[in-house]
Image (cartoon, rainbow, N blue to C red):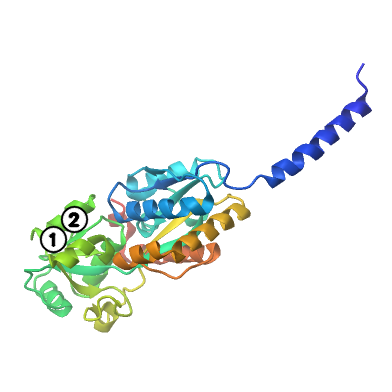
Amino acid sequence: MHNPLRLAAIGLSLAALIGPAVAQEKFPSRPVEVIVTFGPGGGADLMGRQVARLAEPILGVAMPVTNIAGASGNAGLTRLLTSPPDGHTVATLIALSVSSWAAGLGSAKPDDFQVVAMMQNSPSMLFVTKNSPYKTAQEFLDAAKQQPGKLRVATSGLGTQDDITVRYLASQGFPTKNVPFAKPAERYASTVGGHTDALYEEPGDVAQFIESGDLRPLLVFNDQRHESFPDVMASKELKLEIGDLPNFRTIAVPANTPDEIVQRLADAMNQVLDKPEWKEFCAATYTCTEKMSPDQAQRVVVEFHDTVKGYMERFGQEQAAR
């Protein structure tokens, strides 16, 4: 017969040997997958791939990028939430997706995620084509008031910051027609080609059209003018209180990821933000932002969600969720 006391002693000895080995295992122990929640070529994709490329040598493992597009980024975020919360899967979490939750798309909420780092942030702007008859924001708004619903604004869809802003302008006496496009390239082409009268977008995503002169900024939706576009009026200058819908992009993990892993990832992301290559990239896309702790970045997401929800309650959620 086996001696119970001897078996117990062996078990304790094994635990003593195994315990330190487990405790000393460092994160990451294998590749970290980066889920980009939108298709190739867009702003989230460019950001995710830059993060992966620059963070690989910091974390010391490969960081393969997987594009999982659909449902305003929620398809990829669902994949993230069904992955083990061990830090070996991260995803892009951007303002458009958070806005969609407040608009009634899906059941996700900020508390389902832990933001690791704020990587990019930018206000949105109103752009017109180089041949547009509207030379100033005031001229565009005057035309919208004189011809209600005639001017067409290309947006990324209903329930987005774009949609909220268009509806806010209508509430202030400047009604335009929201023309949503699921694909960014089609949205930009619609305004460049004269099929829509204006485009709602952040400047970084249309930088090539700004540089070529095909698109011209009329208005920045912010309390202050954009440092890269000092001649473009801020919405607050026209007494339009719609400067609280920034376009941010973050890296996130599931909410139940251990704190030490979140901090390890956060430290890596902050090192990425300090790299000259990243500073050049964010400057070219007008998206440079200050470094934040995970808790600070999480608060930005929560507050943004609450702000969008407030707008939805104000303007009516039913239309936005269609």
Dot 1 alpha-carbon crowd within 10 angstroms: few under 14, some 14 to 19, many 20 or more = many
Q: Distance between the residues labelled 1 and 2?
A: 7 Å
Q: Position of residue 45 (x, y in %)?
A: 33, 51
| Image spot of residue 124 (x, y percent) | 28, 68
Residue at 27% from the left image edge and 79% from the top image edge:
234
Q: Is residue 112 left or right of residue 106?
A: right
Give, as a three-letter code, the residue at label 2: Arg
Q: Which of 166 and 173 is in front in this view?
A: 166
Q: Residue 187 carries which label?
A: 2
| Local secondary structure at mark 1 | helix
**Res 54 quadrant in image:** bottom left
Residue extending furthest toward the top: 1
Disc assigned to residue 191:
1
Q: In this view, does 180 lie above or below 85?
A: below
Is residue 106 among what the camera can see? Answer: no
Residue 138: x and y in percent read 16, 79
Instruction: Where is residue 59? Give x, y as percent.
Output: 53, 51
